[in-house]
Image (cartoon, grey):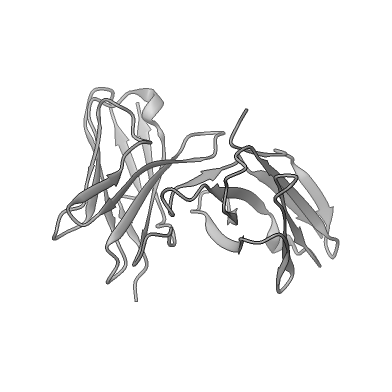
Amino acid sequence: QKEVEQNSGPLSVPEGAIASLNCTYSDRGSQSFFWYRQYSGKSPELIMFIYSNGDKEDGRFTAQLNKASQYVSLLIRDSQPSDSATYLCAVNRGSTLGRLYFGRGTQLTVWP
Amino acid sequence: NAGVMQNPRHLVRRRGQEARLRCSPMKGHSHVYWYRQLPEEGLKFMVYLQKENIIDESGMPKERFSAEFPKEGPSILRIQQVVRGDSAAYFCASSPGRGLGAFGSGTRLTVV
């Protein structure tokens, strides 16, 4: 079983819609959870992190964490074509803080 | 304030040659992480270094790969006797503390 699993997609949504990206993880000891965005040929950039159960909102982005279900999600409201990218879910298990376990990513396309 | 600088951006090596990848952390940052992104795979942790010390190298392949972060100068990821399977994007990130900071723009290694 992979450490972090994501639907590979591609996920395609129209402009203005809500995009929902999902991620599950295998280690119940995981302590912190991250969403990165990666444009083609570029480096990943951090967009959200969450440590506690529940929702965390930042602008158009909402991260949701359910530790009991070992599930993390990212909602993007009012999706824009500029949101088209691959979204990487990552978890940290607490031993080495900067050591993250990444999923393979979900490719999102927002069409005008 | 410049971000994490990696060079070269693109590197082509023939099988059997050596590859040296450089990472200059942000000013004041003494922690460096190296990650590798193989085609169609997620980012994978390789090594975590502080100045003059390797803290966690559990993600490094056992042979041909080495990393250093000297007191002066950039962090170096060295791959000896490269093989085609080493072709990947290599990213480093720096931080002032133990957590993962922003990634550099990466080095795309192609082995021919």
**Horizontal placement of B28 versus A111: left or right?**
left
**Horizontal placement of B82 versus A13: left or right?**
left
Q: Quadrant of the C terminus of chain A?
A: bottom right
Question: Is residue A87 shown above or below A8?
Answer: below
**Residue at the location (76% across, 62% down)?**
A76
Q: Position of residue B90 (x, y in %)?
A: 39, 44
Q: Position of residue A32 (x, y in %)?
A: 57, 55
**Horizontal placement of B50 versus A39: left or right?**
left
Question: Is residue B58 shown above or below A23?
Answer: above
Q: Position of residue A17 (x, y in %)?
A: 86, 61
Quadrant of the rendered image containing residue B99: bottom left
Q: B85 or B62, which lies in front?
A: B62
Q: A90 or B4, which lies in front?
A: A90
Question: Is residue B79 shown above or below A102?
Answer: above
Q: Position of residue A73 (x, y in %)?
A: 73, 53
Quadrant of the rendered image containing residue A10: top right
Number of disc labels: 0
**Residue at the location (26% across, 25% down)?**
B63
**Residue at the location (28% across, 71% down)?**
B27
**Residue at the location (77% across, 56% down)?**
A110
Quadrant of the rendered image containing residue B100: bottom left
Q: Quadrant of the N terminus of chain A?
A: top right
In the picture as drawn, the residue positioned furthest to the bottom comes out as B1
